[in-house]
Every structure is written in C-alpha cells, then in structure tokens.
Image (cartoon, grey):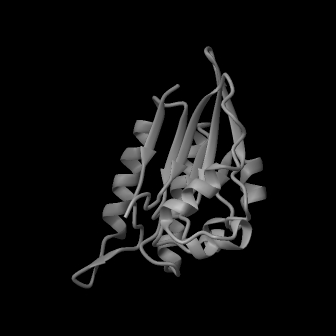
Amino acid sequence: MRFLHLSDLHVGRRLSGLSLLEDQRAVLGQAVEMAGDCDAVLLAGDLYDKPQPSAEAIRVMSDFLVSLRRLGKPVFAVSGNHDAPEQVAYCRELLGECGVFLSPVFDGALRRHVLRDAYGAVEVYLMPFLRPSAVRPFFGEVRTFEDAVRAALSTVAPASDARRVLVAHQYVRG
C-alpha cells in the first residue's frame, strides 16, 4: 500500500508579514498530483499555523481535501501542536462518511480504520497531538509526553495479522 505522508503544512502562515497562502495553495496542488499514485493520504498534524486559522486558510485546506476526495483517495488527518483539536475534529463523523477521517479530541482511546489491498488489511490509527493534561483524566498518573503516548497506545488491541500505521504529530521523548 502506498501512502502520501504530509506534515507541518502550517496553512495560513505569514512570514515577515506576508501571506504564504498562494504559495501553500500551489504546493498543495502539487501534493494532489502526487496523491494520484497513492492509495491514501496521511496528514500528520499542524494542518494550520495557529489554533484559530483565518477564513482564507480554512478555505485552502477545504479545497485541498475536496481535491483529494475527487481522486477517490481516503484522507487520514490528526491535529498537531499548532492546531486546535476541536477545530480539526469538527464534523469528523460527517467527513468520515465522505472518506476524510479526522482525529477526534482525545477521549481515552485510539480508534481503528481499516483499509484493504491485495496483501490484506492495513489498520490506520489516528493520534491527535497529546499533552499529558489531555490524557491524565483517562489514565491518572500521566506526567510526561512519553507517558501520554504510552497510555494512548495501550488502548490499541494486541497485534493482529494486519499491518498497522499510526498517524501522529507528537513529542515522544524529552
């Protein structure tokens, strides 16, 4: 199975006061072209540059997702440390019906999505950026980012015969 993996898009970023949106739109257009040769697209966090992106940044991301879906490619996306998890998770149930699978705000478990190819199942897990404070209500003593990741991963069933992919944007050590 072939994936197009993108991370740290930071859509809406400004550099020295100048908007990068048109450049970002062009790069995302190139990514759509690359996605034509892939089975699925993985967006591993920092979709936006800030938790409250501009309307223009949201439009650029929306156009990108629509273009990917027009190719028939499933899209899996997680929130990163620059994203508001609630914003990335907005309408996730509805978008999931359309083939755009978004990480929820962490609620104590990681969920499995299953793809299939000629070699069998591929399980895709979406882990939003986890701060220890977001995991602590579900697991108690969670002090570090590493503790948070270990706790979240403990919710995944023991290994099956399927291949597994974890889409994450995370501090793991340090």
Residue 67 visible in the shown view: yes
Residue positioned 42% across, 49% down in the render: 6
Residue 111 in percent (x, y) is at: 72, 49
Task: Using residue 127 as the reference point, say whether residue 45 is left or right of it.
Answer: left
On screen, residue 57 versus residue 71, left or right, reads left
**Residue 38 coordinates in the image, percent (x, y):** 49, 31
Above-or-below relation of 85 to 96 = below
Q: On the picture, is 148 further left or further right than 23? A: right
Residue at position x 69%, y 52% in the image: 110
Quadrant location of residue 11? Answer: bottom left
- Give the residue furthest to the bottom: 17
Report the number of discs: 0
Q: Is residue 11 above or below residue 52?
A: above
Quadrant (top left, top right, bottom left, bottom right) of the C terminus: bottom left
Taking depth in this image into account, of 138 and 78 the one nearest to the observer is 138
Q: Residue furthest top?
A: 118
Residue drawn at (35%, 56%), measured in percent from left and top? Answer: 26
What residue is drawn where x is 48% and y is 75%?
Answer: 56
Q: Position of residue 139 (x, y in %)?
A: 70, 65
Is residue 62 visible in the rendered image? The answer is no
Q: Is residue 50 left or right of residue 74?
A: left
Where is residue 140? Give x, y as percent: 69, 70
Q: Quadrant of residue 25?
A: bottom left
Q: Residue furthest front?
A: 141
